[in-house]
Image: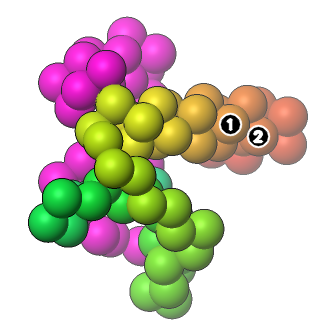
Amino acid sequence: MNIEMLKQTLDVLNINFKDYSLDGISLPMQTVLSRSGDTWVTFEYDEVGRSLDLKEFINEEDACKDILERLCYLVEWRKKYNVR
């Protein structure tokens, strides 16, 4: 999976584009995918500007899978606790 395929999957799953960033630009309360040189980085950017649960990957595919898992978990969590 690459970023284009990830974006298509997120659209099909109807995951709000405001919940994530695939270009490394971080806004509060987003799941972020960023490229830093030869490394791919994923993290949660919280409401006060902290990067949480940072993970590094050596390839795009693994980073995209991680973002997809994080966002699917977010959707399930919101359903469970009735959060929008």
Pointer 2 residue = 77
Q: How many marks?
A: 2
Relative to residue 74, is residue 22 drawn left or right? left
Q: Is mark 2 on a helix, strand or loop?
A: helix
Residue neighbourhood size for the residue with mark 1, other residues' Cα within 10 Å, grouped as few (<14), some (14–19), many (≥20): few
Q: Mark 1 points at which residue?
A: 73
Mark 2 crowd level (few <14, some 14–19, many ≥20, 10 Å Cα): few
When the figure is inspected, residue 70 is found, relative to residue 41, above or below; the finding is above
- Residue extending furthest top? 12
Give the mark toward the camera: 1 or 2. 1
Q: Do the residues labelled 1 and 2 touch (CB within 8 Å)?
A: yes
Q: Nearer the viewer, residue 50 or 14?
A: 50
Q: What residue type is labelled 1?
A: Tyr
- The foreground one among 78 and 36 is 36
Q: Residue at x 85, y 34 (%)?
A: 80
Residue 80 vs residue 25, the one in the foreground: 25
Placement of the C terminus among the 4 image quadrants: top right
Q: Quadrant of the N terminus?
A: top left
Q: From where the camera sits, is residue 58 visible?
A: yes
C-alpha separation, residue under disc 1 versus residue under disc 2: 6 Å
Quadrant hosting residue 75: top right
Mark 1 secondary-structure assignment: helix
Q: Which colour scheme is used?
A: rainbow
Per the rendering, the mark at residue 13 is none
Q: Position of residue 42 (x, y in %)?
A: 42, 57
- Residue at 51% x, 40% y is 66
Q: What residue type is labelled 2?
A: Trp
x then y, percent, for residue 25: 20, 66
Q: Read off the magenta span.
A: 1-28
Is residue 22 within the magenta segment? yes
